[in-house]
Amino acid sequence: MVAPPDNDVIWARSLHHSYNGSPGLRGVSLGVGDGEILAVTGPRGSGKSTLLHCLSGQLTAQEGEVWFNSVPVHTMGPRLREQLRRDRFGWIGAEADLVPELTAWENAALPLLLRGVSNRAARKTATEWLERLDIGPLAKKRPHALLQSQRQRISVARALAAAPTVIFADEPTATLHRAERAQLLRTLTTAARSHGITMVLATHDLEVAALADRALGLLDGRRVNDVSLPAASDTEGRSACSLSV
Ligand SMILES: Nc1ncnc2c1ncn2[C@@H]1O[C@H](COP(=O)(O)OP(=O)(O)OP(=O)(O)O)[C@@H](O)[C@H]1O
């Protein structure tokens, strides 16, 4: 087993994974640098979600290696992987996946509470992120009382509040309208940049991928040539990293 380059936070070699014989990933290798935002693009079924699940330790690839900060993840047992996900990773999916019984702030604070942060400190941090995401006044509402776009903001607040080293975002704005999508993505990528968070962003949308520093393409579970991104506009793109969210 050869250790990965020191400057890659996430590094994967030759990942293969199939579902009952049907291939999900076929030999994907990649590295993500410290603080880098990498977009993973490709059509539906190309393997983006499978790749993010493998990189984030939710799924162990049948073959291949995943390393986080030069520590092998693919050889970790379930408890260590759980701890790694809780303490160092954030996850944002297409659906907000909130706990229905908890309020907005409790949902956003959940990763901190699970880490043993005091209720008071976790509430303060979660509330600050809800405010930055323009949903501060909804902090005491439960998910059923909120719009899909507001629930998704809570899920973004939950990921950012935990100050993770890496955020994995799997089609985070796929269910939102165009204007909401642009605003939420801008806030997310700006916050990641200003807090030095590394991000792996799966999307089938090249306009979304344009917010990343770099993009790699998948097709039928294989890596294809690195994708050339459309020029990002000054307000939404890679240059828009000066907001202090
Ligand atoms: N749990 C599963 N059981 C069986 N097959 C699966 C499962 N998850 C993914 N697959 C298959 O693996 C392949 C890759 O799927 P994956 O969801 O990783 O792609 P994707 O690019 O994220 O697609 P989408 O954008 O639709 O989510 C597809 O052929 C898919 O049908």
Image (cartoon, rainbow, N blue to C red):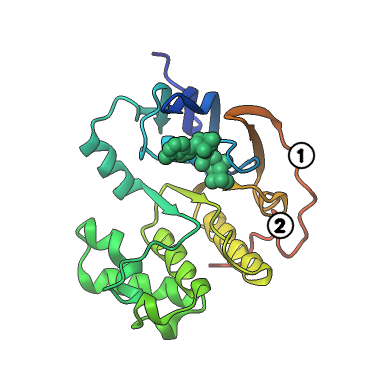
Compared to residue 126, the image places residue 62 above or below, namely above
Q: Which residue is mark 1?
A: 228
Label 2 element class: loop
Left-right relation of 190 to 75: right
Q: Quadrant of residue 178?
A: bottom right
Q: Quadrant of residue 244?
A: bottom right
- The location of residue 172, given as percent across then percent down, is 53, 57
Label 1 element class: loop
Q: Amino acid at mark 2?
A: Gly
Furthest residue toward top: 1
Q: CA distance from mark 2 to mark 1?
A: 14 Å
Compared to residue 189, the image places residue 76 above or below, namely above
Q: Residue at x 36, y 30 (%)?
A: 60
Left-right relation of 217 to 143: right
Give the total of numbered labels.
2
Q: Is residue 50 visible?
A: no
- The location of residue 105, given as percent across then percent down, is 34, 74
Q: Residue at x 36, y 40 (%)?
A: 58
Classify 10 Å Cα crowding around label 2: few (below 14), some (14-19), many (20 and above). many
| The N terminus, quarter of image | top left
Classify 10 Å Cα crowding around label 1: few (below 14), some (14-19), many (20 and above). few
Q: Which residue is mark 2?
A: 237
Q: Nearer the viewer, residue 56 or 49?
A: 49
Q: Residue at x 50, y 72 (%)?
A: 148
Compared to residue 170, the image places residue 140 above or below, namely below
Q: Is residue 91 visible?
A: yes
Which mark is on residue 95? none
Q: Amino acid at mark 1?
A: Ser
Q: Nearer the viewer, residue 202 or 196?
A: 202
